Amino acid sequence: MDKKEIVKEGRTSLGIEFGSTRIKAVLIEEGGAPLASGSYEWENQYVNGIWTYNLDDVWKGLQSCYQNLVGDVKEKYDVELTQIGSIGFSAMMHGYLAFDKEDHLLVPFRTWRNTITEEAASKLTKEFNYNIPQRWSIAHLYQAILNKEEHVKDVAFLTTLAGYVHYKLTGKKVLGVGDASGMFPIDIKIGNYDQTMIRQFNNLIREEGFLWKLEEILPQVLMAGEAAGSLTEEGARLLDPSGRLKAGILVCPPEGDAGTGMAATNSVGVRTGNISAGTSVFAMIVLERELSKVYPEIDLVTTPDGALVAMVHCNNCTSDLNAWVNIFDQFAKSIGAKIDKNTLFSVLYNKALEGDADCGGLISYNYFSGEPVTGFDEGAPLFVRKAEDQFNLANFMRVHLYSSLAALKAGLDLLFKSESVKVDKMFGHGGLFKTKGVGQRVAAAAMNTSVSVMETAGEGGAWGIALLADYMKNKNESESLQEYLSQKIFADQSGSSMEPVKEDVEGFNQFMKRYMAGLKIEHVAVDTLK
């Protein structure tokens, strides 16, 4: 069957992911091959000390992204998109979206980027003997309680961005287990929220006299492959105001960007892992066993089918790097040079490979916002050097690439060195890996392990959630997610693997010594610039 007929008959799956700076849609055929895509650029706002997105922008962005996809389908296949086999929605994990019983948003959306819950996260980590990061939904809820915020008594439903979009389009208050594991700890034995910790939390807040209990306001947890409702008539109009899209389309459990990253890189099996590097950066490794103790730098989440995953999440990755590339872009325009942005990235990234392995003594901190892994509630981008250091373009670009992964390396070293965690395959995806061979080489040096980038890496999380939607609709009765991905999606996929270069590994380690010692400079910068 040709692609036009596949699209006309709805033998497709659609994935839409809300990333930090872009909403992306990918339409795939059965078997995972992308057919069409759409996107919409958006940005978070810093309002009254809170990183947020306006919910009106969520719907404007979703509709614009979908219409962009519809246009791509029309251009490629001369087909009006009216039916789709299955749909999935994913988004940035964590954060705080709290609604009352009438579905009114009680306070502006508090995103993963906020570092305002240190007291709550610390107390809950101690109470549960389980690491509760600042960006987790339960930390935001408890901090609001500690702050005596008036709205908390009216909370009827607490969810993530993906869970919110899914609810409005299907009427179902559900969440994929991977996204749910960034709201509250999951007991992997039962595939649900940890019931002991639920009771501990309810006891902790009993004297507040709220009319709700925690288990009543959290979304229902679902595993990959389970049905999670269907697109309602109202939902179809929300997604496609033109009225062409038909209701009744099956929708898979909404997932977070961690889970879609695992699906998009075929890293849901034990001893596999992936690095997602964009505005933020996180690395995940599927564990063979539980860790020996609690590490504040390491989150425990799950794969979309409920296996235990160690995740190191850093708030900052490419924002500062992109800002410097934009400076070069402005310079080029100022002298009348017309340089394609992708070409500019490629030239500057590849220039970094000409630099000294240790960046010639330069230091950079990419902290647009706080970085809990290294102990920062607030950030200030900072570039530092001594007069005698090797300050040239190659080293300048190299140090900003190193800096984008430095906090991540600090966390991963705990897994590799303190817990002897083993990883057989590490996959990279996200913006840092778009320039062939550069981000991949830096990541291999940072982790001292082989890093692979698949040809589909650029499709990212939107493709990952499309795969999860396809898996739900087309899986065999006993087919596991790992079997589906390995045998149906990635069996014929080609990609490139890169082994760590010895000199790069040694150079990165030298850079890390300067980076860790220089954190005191970053603290002074943050305090001074307040």
Image: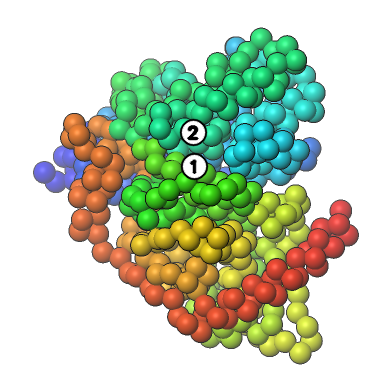
Question: Which of these two is toward me, 238 or 447?
Answer: 447
Residue name at image x 70 percent, y 75 percent: 514
Please tell me whether residue 235 is drawn above or below residue 357 in the rendered image: above
Residue 21 appearing in the image: no
Q: Nearer the viewer, residue 417 or 445?
A: 417
For disc 2, the marked residue is 186
Residue farthest front in this picture: 292
Image quadrant where residue 51 sits = top right
Could you say whether the residue bearing mark 1 is in a helix, strand or loop? strand
Amino acid on which the number 2 mark rests in the picture:
Ile
Instruction: Identify the residue under disc 1.
Output: 301
Q: Is residue 315 above or below residue 187?
A: below
Residue at far top of view: 211
| Residue at left offset 57%, top offset 48% | 293
Residue at 79% across, 28% down = 147
Q: Position of residue 211 (x, y in %)?
A: 66, 9
**Circle 1: residue type:** Val
Q: Residue at x 30, y 65 (%)?
A: 495
> What kind of element bears circle 2?
strand
Label 2 – label 1 distance at C-alpha: 7 Å
448 vs 114, left or right, is: left
Q: Please say if 26 is above or below 199.
A: below
Label 2 close to label 1 by CB (< 8 Å): yes
Q: Quadrant of residue 214?
A: top right
